[in-house]
Amino acid sequence: MPQHHRLAIVTALAFSSLSIVAGAQERTEVTISDNGVQAENLTSSQDGSVYFGSTANGTIYKAAPGASRAEPWILASATGLMNTFGLLADDATNTLWVCQNSTGGRGGAPVAGQTALRSFDLRTGAARGTFPFPTNGGVCNDMAVGADGTVYVTESFANRILRLRPGASAVDVWVPADEQLAGVDGIAVLADGAVYVNTFFAGRLFRIPVNADGSAGTMTPIETSLPLTRPDGLRRVGPRTMVQAEGQGRVTELTIDGNRAEVRVLGEGLTGATGVTVAGNTALVLVERARAVVVPYRQQ
């Protein structure tokens, strides 16, 4: 969700169960080579590169594998990007998915097409596609990719979930506006094929199964073993496991067992954590202030 970041930095947590990317384990922090970026989220690719978006200027920044500084990469001035929120590196299709939003704020009437899901070549940064939202009343927040290549996108403040089907030329509404999804934010797809989302304001977690025809099944609330406070970025790390950044300054691991999630605290005191990604054997957590904290992580 929107946060103001003077200088974006990520904190690194040891992630021992995942394959190690060369150089990634030596890196304890990544800073952005620019001022006033106001990064809202981050992502990483399999080679250990880390990517940040900017809500302030729209530019996307990239840190090379093992590098501790992210440089301007996809320039807003060249692509028309603006107010970028979530972004997701999809190595399987060599795609960087990006949420672009209107600069007009919530609930306004921005020019059609300003709020959109956009795609770029993950290796070159070349622009590929722009998929405007059906209406511009919400905020394109974050996305996840299903096994069949469908991209699911949370639309905060419109309380719904959109999707882009493989080969489609436009996004469509997958889950219509629902009060339970007020402040819908992070999103992930687990091995069961279901879509999991959290809500920033109420701190809730939901599972939405995908029916055989691709439509959304009945949304089910997931009980959590610990309360969630302003949950934000959500990423899959295992068949039943996700990691999550929480605005209270905490990073948690969520393991799904039926309609319950076991919550384990990996790190806290991070002052406004808004995004998390996995790079090699570390989880990189976007924080509000210019500092980095290393927290050991061992799966139980």
Image (spheres, rainbow, N blue to C red):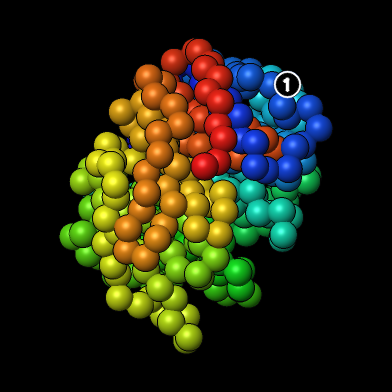
Residue 20, x across and y down, in percent? 75, 37
Q: Is residue 199 left or right of residue 5?
A: left
Q: Nearer the viewer, residue 130 or 92?
A: 92
Residue shown at the point (56%, 49%) measured from the top left = 237
Q: Secondary structure at mark 1?
A: helix
Residue 98 showing in the rendered view: no
Q: Nearer the viewer, residue 40 or 37?
A: 40
Left or right of residue 221: residue 100? right
Given the current orientation, which residue lies at the most extreme top position?
290
Determine whether, in the image, residue 153 is placed left or right of residue 88: left
What is the x, y in percent for residue 125? 72, 44
Residue at 81% over, 32% down: 22
Looking at the image, which residue is at 21% across and 59% down? 180
Up-down relation of residue 81 to residue 65 (above or below) = below
* Category of crowding for the residue at label 1, using alpha-carbon neighbours closer than 10 angstroms: few (below 14), some (14–19), many (at least 20): few
As rendered, which of 174 and 108 lies closer to the eye? Answer: 174
Residue 45 visible in the displayed image: yes
- Where residue 114 appears, as percent x and y from the top left, is 44, 50
- The residue to which callout 1 is attached is 26
Three-letter code for the amino acid on which mark 1 is drawn: Glu
Q: Quadrant of the N terminus?
A: top left
